[in-house]
Image (cartoon, coloured by chain):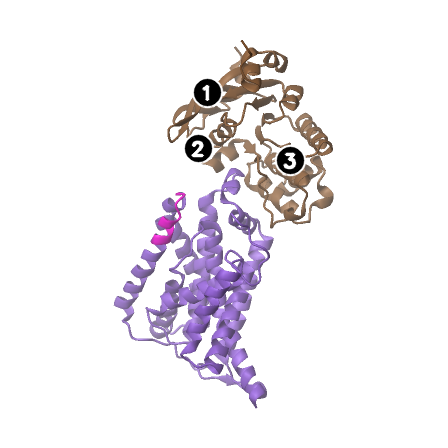
Chain colours: A purple, B brown
Amino acid sequence: MNLILTLRVLVNGVLFGTTYGIAAVGLSLIFGTMRIIFFAQGTFIIFFAYISYWLLTLLGIDPYLSLIIVIPASMLLGSALYYGIFKEAAANEDKNISLLLAIGLMYLMENFMLVVWTPDPRSVVTSYTTLVFRPFGIVIPFTRLTTLFIAVLTAAGVFIFLKKTLIGTAVRAASEDVVSTTLMGINPNWVNAVAFAIGIGLAGVAGVALATIYPFDPSYGFIFAIKALIALALGGIGNVYGALLGGILLGLIESLGSFYVGGGWADAISYGVFLLVLIFRPQGLFGGSIKKA
Amino acid sequence: MDSSNVVLRLDKICKSFGGLQVLVDLDMNVERDEMLGLIGPNGAGKSTVFNVITSIYRPDRGDIFFLGEKITGLAPHKVCHRGISRTYQLVKTFLKMTVLENVMLASVYGGKHPDKGTMERALETLELVELTPRKDILATHLTLSNRRLLEIAMALASMPVLTLLDEPMAGLTTVEIHKLLEVIKRARDERKFSIIWIEHRVDAILDFCDRVVVLDYGVKIADGKPDEVANDPKFIEAYLGEPAA
């Protein structure tokens, strides 16, 4: 009985952690080329959760089906954001300007959402929202399982893109050294725009996935950004693969923490782990050695 | 005066950082297929010349002409597309990527040469620097000397008109230096391109270059054939100090 309970906690942790994971992969990509923590990531996730909510309530489009619209739209929005807002700042050696832009954008979006959708929590309710599988007595909601499936598929897509395509290789190169990629003839704006497109695209996927499993409100975006940041730190900042694992690990920590220590402690524990990792293993749990400047 | 043979021309380039004048009214030419050595004591402004040519720094005054066109202030990636590539004093290869991926990037993005497949060109360039057997290993696992060769391959994969080599021999053993020189000479014979070569080892420059420019505190103090420069009193003074009275 106790074993099944533990298993249930673990499974839930993994299932929820994958959402953090996709968000963190987006953060990691944008960090790689832009060298900033893109704080607005969480707010965009919530934004796309609302878009999915609207598509369902106004047009009757199923959330999972809405991905067909949300993914290309969010990628377009991502590159537009780069060219419209970040392009000039990215050329500046002082990265604080880009960072402040990201924070400004986050609050702008949050307040925009407060006006449009009010501070009341919304949730996406479908015919399968309450659908639950019970293998061996472990309760697995259908929506969470689908989220895991989508996350794995998305992450695999991003990894293949980075590994197998030339554009992906250029993005990887830029995250090692932007100046030398530029001198090799790679347009830095173009690489940054690609990173933004994928980063916001991932926010789109995470937003839809989140909407199906959790009630959300505009202020949740900032919290989500912080969670993604913790996942990023666990996995190693700049390590795309680690980011996904970091997200899953964070999900586990929260799930185990709230079950064995107490619900109120879950967040405190994850922030504690965040600090400990940054102090003792700044390269992340899955990375190799870190380059000391 | 046959100016059509000039590939790169620096026209009265001035660059200062804070109050420090690093380059003062520098005039310099590079001819087609020429190997030009650029030497000078530490802090003479040699690397700054490279950073100005590749548009990392914008000169305070003066202009840079490449193949007859002004390229002053052009974005660095566009300078590369025009046909200028470079290597660095501290080797900059992408360590987390394989040798082939490194060269592929340079081959694909470095220039626009529709005549030949980029993959083919990347492989051919690797062959040129004798790194073909190591094409699938990560750059981080290469020795320093192989990493330098890789960097040279990356600089050559874009089929440049002009390549800037920043101290390619630094930190290498005598045997490795021999191999490097051999590769550079062979590449130049096969590919035909111009080189500006910064080097600490003046003897190598005097041996291998067609022409030598000497910088001292950002001022050009000598420019000519290696044997002329070697006997130039200003050159001797810059390197050995003022002669005893």
Magenta segment range? A92-100
Q: Which of A235 and B129 is in front in this view?
A: A235
Of the numbered discs in the image, which one, if any, rests on residue B26? Answer: 1
Pointer 2 residue: B57
Q: Tag 2: Cα neighbours inside 10 Å, few (<14), some, or many (≥20)?
A: some
Could you give the CA–CA distance between mark 1 and mark 3, rounded to whole angstroms?
29 Å
Q: What residue type is labelled 2?
A: Tyr
Please tell me whether mark 3 sits on a helix, a strand or a loop.
loop
Looking at the image, residue A25 lies above or below residue A249: above
Label 2 vs label 3, nearer the camera: 3
Residue B111 in the image: x percent, y percent? 55, 36
- The chain letter for the residue carrying disc 3 is B
Pointer 3 residue: B171
Q: Are marks 2 and 3 on the same chain?
A: yes
Residue B26 in the image: x percent, y percent? 46, 20
N-term mark: 1 or 2: 1
Please tell me whether mark 2 sits on a helix, a strand or a loop.
loop
Q: Is residue A160 left or right of residue A57?
A: right
- The chain letter for the residue carrying disc 1 is B
Q: Which amino acid does label 3 sit on?
A: Gly
Residue B60 in the image: x percent, y percent? 38, 27
> Residue B210 occupies which quadrant of the picture?
top right
**Would you say residue A175 sits in the magenta stretch?**
no
Q: Residue at x 48, y 48 (%)?
A: A191
